[in-house]
Image: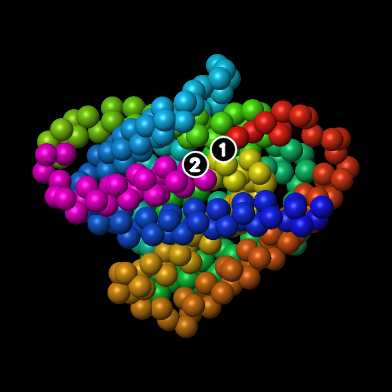
């Protein structure tokens, strides 16, 4: 019985690590794209391609919205998701990689804090010690060029970290125990993002699309299909099978993958300091998982048996 339960946990962790990997690689791709097109245009096209791809998948799988509440949840999550990506993209374009990487890592601290407040079950002190070490690791990881004076980009990244924590917590809060389809929720979020950002980018969208080179379209395809369709679908699926706090820690390895992609594909160098930061993040994530798992299992042992609807959730 213990072996049967451990396999889903490992699968969920691997999926979340995969999300961290593709998101880590997205920084290099997005950086190039923002040089070829305005930020809002990049986001609008990314969401549009994602919405079309997910619509095709839903049609082939005969998936549809089953209730007004499910649609409302998808719309709300679509708004928070679009806000996260918009703030992140504008923030990264207006600040240094050092400050951006450090500030966005605060999601690791903010998510369990919000989750604990909503559930009225705060995390134990060792968990916050682990997240503090992870933040220090990120600081070392991205401090190759040193710190600079805070600017508007830093404020946008701080807002992105806060909204991302809200988004991750909302997924767990609104979908746990509900028979919502992860594909339905993800498609709804993509459609909402495509509508909102296409409207925002409308003044520049038409003339920019006709001048985008093939390489830019390939990069948009990667951002849409790997970093959006796969990542958000996998994130929604995985968070519903674990806790937002655990998911945040696993996805907190995103800067590690960003450095790995930068070194292997972007020709960047890895110093002793940045390598030490990567080690700290991995170690803190592993220890934080251990603390969070024991805390969650202890709470489950005291909680009543789950409702049958919890078994009906589908990917």
Q: Residue at x 43, y 54 (%)?
A: 23
The image position of residue 159, as x and y in percent, is 47, 45
Q: Please determine whether, in this image, residue 296 is positioned above or below residue 188.
A: below
Magenta-colored stretch includes residue 250:
no
**SS category of the residue bearing label 1:** loop
Quarter assignment of residue 132:
bottom right
In the rendered structure, the answer to whether residue 177 lies left or right of residue 151 reads right
In the rendered structure, the answer to whether residue 3 lies left or right of residue 157 reads right
Q: Please determine whether, in this image, residue 277 is positioned above or below residue 194.
A: below
Q: Is residue 266 visible?
A: yes
Q: Main secondary structure of the magenta part?
A: helix
Q: Is residue 88 visible?
A: no
The numbered disc on residue 315 is 1
The numbered disc on residue 233 is 2
**Residue span colored magenta:** 209-234
**SS category of the residue bearing label 2:** helix
Q: Please determine whether, in this image, residue 57 is positioned above or below residue 111.
A: above
- Residue found at the very far right of the displayed protein: 302
- Viewer-closest of 261 and 155: 261
Query: In whole angstroms, how far apart are the C-alphas of marks 1 and 2?
Result: 8 Å
């Amino acid at each position: 019985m213990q072996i049967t339960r451990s396999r889903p946990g490992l699968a969920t962790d691997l999926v979340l690590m995969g999300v961290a990997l593709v998101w880590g690689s997205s920084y290099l791709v997005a950086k190039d794209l923002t040089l070829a097109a305005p930020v809002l245009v990049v986001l609008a096209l990314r969401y549009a391609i994602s919405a079309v791809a997910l619509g095709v998948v839903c049609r082939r799988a005969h998936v549809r919205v089953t209730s007004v509440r499910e649609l409302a949840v998808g719309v709300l999550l679509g708004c928070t998701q679009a806000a996260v990506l918009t703030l992140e993209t504008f923030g990264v374009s207006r600040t240094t990689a050092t400050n951006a990487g450090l500030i966005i890592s605060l999601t690791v601290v903010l998510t369990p804090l919000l989750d604990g407040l909503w559930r009225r079950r705060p995390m134990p002190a060792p968990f916050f010690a682990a997240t503090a070490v992870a933040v220090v690791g990120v600081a070392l990881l991205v401090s190759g060029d040193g710190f600079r004076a805070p600017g508007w980009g830093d404020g946008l990244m701080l807002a992105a970290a806060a909204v991302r924590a809200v988004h991750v917590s909302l997924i767990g809060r609104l979908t746990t125990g509900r028979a919502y389809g992860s594909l339905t929720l993800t498609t709804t979020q993509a459609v909402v993002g495509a509508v909102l950002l296409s409207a925002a980018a409308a003044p520049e969208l038409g003339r920019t699309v006709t001048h985008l080179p093939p390489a830019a379209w390939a990069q948009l395809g990667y951002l849409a299909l790997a970093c959006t369709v796969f990542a958000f679908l996998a994130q929604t699926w995985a968070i519903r099978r674990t806790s937002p706090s655990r998911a945040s820690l696993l996805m907190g390895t995103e800067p590690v993958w960003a450095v790995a992609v930068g070194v292997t594909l972007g020709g960047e160098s890895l110093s002793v300091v940045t390598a030490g930061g990567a080690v700290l993040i991995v170690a803190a994530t592993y220890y934080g998982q251990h603390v969070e798992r024991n805390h969650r299992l202890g709470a489950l042992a005291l909680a009543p048996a789950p409702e049958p609807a919890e078994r009906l959730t589908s990917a």
